[in-house]
Image (spheres, rainbow, N blue to C red):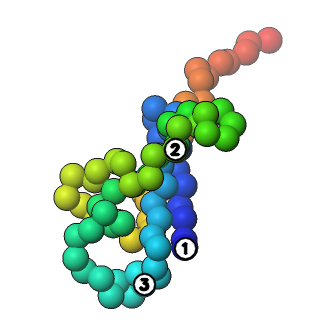
């Protein structure tokens, strides 16, 4: 089982995962494993309190094979300049 995790802008963690190795894309059908992401709704909580939901976020007809986009986290705060 392969996993890829990404933190979303809503502070939830999204997982793209499969139960089989889909490379080189032997399964071209639409199924719950490649059209849904799993979600950790409260990643700062321990154990069952994190509210993990497997295959609950629908991708709107798109498919993923254990890959998520590389999006930059722009929540770096304001740029502050100091003058001497």
Quarter residue 68 falls in: bottom left
Q: Residues within 10 Å of mark 2 (few under 14, many from 20)?
A: some
Sequence-wise first label, 3 or 2: 3
Q: Are marks 2 and 1 in contact (CB under 8 Å)?
A: no
At x 52%, y 44%, the residue is: 52
Q: Residue furthest top?
A: 84
- Mark-to-mark CA distance, 3 and 2: 26 Å
Q: Are marks 3 and 2 in contact (CB under 8 Å)?
A: no
The front one of 83 and 54 is 54
**Whole-percent x, y for residue 17 in the image:** 47, 65
Q: Residue furthest left?
A: 61
Query: Which residue was labeled with disc 2?
Result: 52
- Mark-to-mark CA distance, 3 and 1: 12 Å
Q: Is residue 62 left or right of residue 2?
A: left
Q: Is residue 1 visible?
A: yes
Q: Residues within 10 Å of mark 1 (few under 14, many from 20)?
A: few
Q: Is residue 74 visible?
A: no
Residue 46 vertical position relative to residue 5 in the rendered view, above or below: above
Query: Which residue was labeled with disc 1?
Result: 1
Sequence-wise first label, 2 or 1: 1
**Which secondary structure, mark 2?**
strand
Residue 37 vertical position relative to residue 46 in the rendered view, above or below: below
**Which secondary structure, mark 1?**
loop
**Whole-percent x, y for residue 81 in the image:** 67, 18
Query: Which residue was labeled with disc 3?
Result: 23
Total labels drawn? 3
Q: Quadrant of the N terminus?
A: bottom right
Q: Is residue 82 left or right of residue 4?
A: right
- Mark-to-mark CA distance, 2 and 1: 17 Å
Q: Residue furthest front?
A: 48
At x 74%, y 13%, the residue is: 83
**Whole-percent x, y for residue 49 in the image:** 61, 33
């Amino acid at each position: 089982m392969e996993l890829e995790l990404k933190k979303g802008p809503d502070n939830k963690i999204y997982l793209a995962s499969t139960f089989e190795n889909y490379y080189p894309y032997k399964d071209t059908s639409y199924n719950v494993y490649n059209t849904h992401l799993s979600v950790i709704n409260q990643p700062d909580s321990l154990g069952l309190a994190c509210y993990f939901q497997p295959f609950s976020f629908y991708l709107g007809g798109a498919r993923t094979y254990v890959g998520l986009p590389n999006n930059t986290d722009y929540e770096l705060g304001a740029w502050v300049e100091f003058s001497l």
